[in-house]
């Protein structure tokens, strides 16, 4: 992934579609998801279709990502209807990346065959761990054997781009367990791997459990796990938490990180079009009611222009291993007290062509420094 290629995704067009349905809600999850509401899946898809039809016409889509929730949990024919509507409304470019998230326990060869026929060409499995005890603690409903069965079903059906998501830092996870998980994951020879630290979010069952005295993830242990992943994964890391074989980087994510434009459909979905970052109504029933009434189901939007646009460019772009090109924001960061400290500590680096984060474990500190930057005062010398 060259800087030039990464930056070219600013001109990409993408769409995210949120599918909120799950068998059960994981204790750490704070996404807009529901369990036990499968009876409204068809109604929900009709609402998403209505939202797509209401959208402003656009150019053909280069990447489509169905996330959740668990898209593979509902009838694949419903997913096909969403793709058909996107194609009718916007168009889909030849060779577009069309991706969905899936759980191992509800993914079969029959499902994989159907998805391939519908046009999907990339699948990302929520594997999380290959340790049965860790999976139980994370509230997952699959085992390590099911991960392999689902993975091989995807390959047999013709998916040439298969990703695995892993979570590290569960309090009961040992270093040996994480090493074994990394080994089992890489042995399957996926094209892409994502590794995320377990995060305690307020309002989740995990958050309440930690609040009441249960062990929280240890930051030092999580840092160690991250470094183990860096050493074990035989791919290049192209973003803080993502590794891939050359050419198998997630194009939808590359569009987001390049400050490219992307549509968003479904409850709680976030998008970026025409300088506006918008978010949809989160509550499922309220979202469906709005879409069925012919109203765009927006919960709010923020205009991103001027200095805010430059801060936004740094915030999303610095997640990438290639960093960002110079600009007013990079100069402001390097001239700030925080920026100088980060530079002197070797957290960020600048070589006149790119500003990069070279210690990704400290990305949160970099983001805080970026958000604290003040717009430079430009003097008006026109009367001088």
Image (cartoon, rainbow, N blue to C red):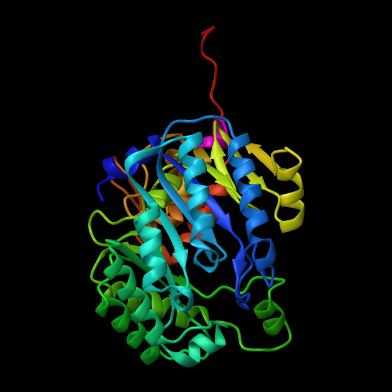
Indicate whether 383 appears above or below 175: above
Query: In this rendering, would 267 be left or right of 150?
Result: right
Place of residue 107 in the rendered image (x, y in percent of width and height, measured from the top left) = 43, 73
**Residue displayed at 27% across by 61% down:** 160
Q: Which residues are magenta?
A: 303-309
Q: How many marks?
A: 0
Place of residue 274 in the rendered image (x, y in percent of width and height, measured from the top left) = 54, 31
Place of residue 277 in the rendered image (x, y in percent of width and height, measured from the top left) = 59, 41
Indicate whether 302 appears above or below 219: above
**Residue displayed at 59% across by 35% down:** 55
Give the image quarter of residue 136.
Answer: bottom right
Q: Which residue is at the front of the view, 200 or 25?
A: 25
Q: Is residue 324 magenta?
A: no
**Residue displayed at 60% across by 45% down:** 49
Residue 372 visible in this rendered orientation of the protein = no
Which residue is outermost to the top? 383
Give the image quarter of residue 28.
Answer: bottom right
Query: In this rendering, would 198 be left or right of 186?
Result: right
**Residue displayed at 40% across by 83% down:** 146
Query: In this rendering, would 77 be left or right of 39?
Result: left
Indicate whether 15 appears above or below 140: above
Place of residue 315 in the rendered image (x, y in percent of width and height, measured from the top left) = 49, 48
Q: Which residue is at the front of the view, 258 or 274?
A: 274
Q: Which residue is at the front of the view, 338 or 161?
A: 161
């Amino acid at each position: 992934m060259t800087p030039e290629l990464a930056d070219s995704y600013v001109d990409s067009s993408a769409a995210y579609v949120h599918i909120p349905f799950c068998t059960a809600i994981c204790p750490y999850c704070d996404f807009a998801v529901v369990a036990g509401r499968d009876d409204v899946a068809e109604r929900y898809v009709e609402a998403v279709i209505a939202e797509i039809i209401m959208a402003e016409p656009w150019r053909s889509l280069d990447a489509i990502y169905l996330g959740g929730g668990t898209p593979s949990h509902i009838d694949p024919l419903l997913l096909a209807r969403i793709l058909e509507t996107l194609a009718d409304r916007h168009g889909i470019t030849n060779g577009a990346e069309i991706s969905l998230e899936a759980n191992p326990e509800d993914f079969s060869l029959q499902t994989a065959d159907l998805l391939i026929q519908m046009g999907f060409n990339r699948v990302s499995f929520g594997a999380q761990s290959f340790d049965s005890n860790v999976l139980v603690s994370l509230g997952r409903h699959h085992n390590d054997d099911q991960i392999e069965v689902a993975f091989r079903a995807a390959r047999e059906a013709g998916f040439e781009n298969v990703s695995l998501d892993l979570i590290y830092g569960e309090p009961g996870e040992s270093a040996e367990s994480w090493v074994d998980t990394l080994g089992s994951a890489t042995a399957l020879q996926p094209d892409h791997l994502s590794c995320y630290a377990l995060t305690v979010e307020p309002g989740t069952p995990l958050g309440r459990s930690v609040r009441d005295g249960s062990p929280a993830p240890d930051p030092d242990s999580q840092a160690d796990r991250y470094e183990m992943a860096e050493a074990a994964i035989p791919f290049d890391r192209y973003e803080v938490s993502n590794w891939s074989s050359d050419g198998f980087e997630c194009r939808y994510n590359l569009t987001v990180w390049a400050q490219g434009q992307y549509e968003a459909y479904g409850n709680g979905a976030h998008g970026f079009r025409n300088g506006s970052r918008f978010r949809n109504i989160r509550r499922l029933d309220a979202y469906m009611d709005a879409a069925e009434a012919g109203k765009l189901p927006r919960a709010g939007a923020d205009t991103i222009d001027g200095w805010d646009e430059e801060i936004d460019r740094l915030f999303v772009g610095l997640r990438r291993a290639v960093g960002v090109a110079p600009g007013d924001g990079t100069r402001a960061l390097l001239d700030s007290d925080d920026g100088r400290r980060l530079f002197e500590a070797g957290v960020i680096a600048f070589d006149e062509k790119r500003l990069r984060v070279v210690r990704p474990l400290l990305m949160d500190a970099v983001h805080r420094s970026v958000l604290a930057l003040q717009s430079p005062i430009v003097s008006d010398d026109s009367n001088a």
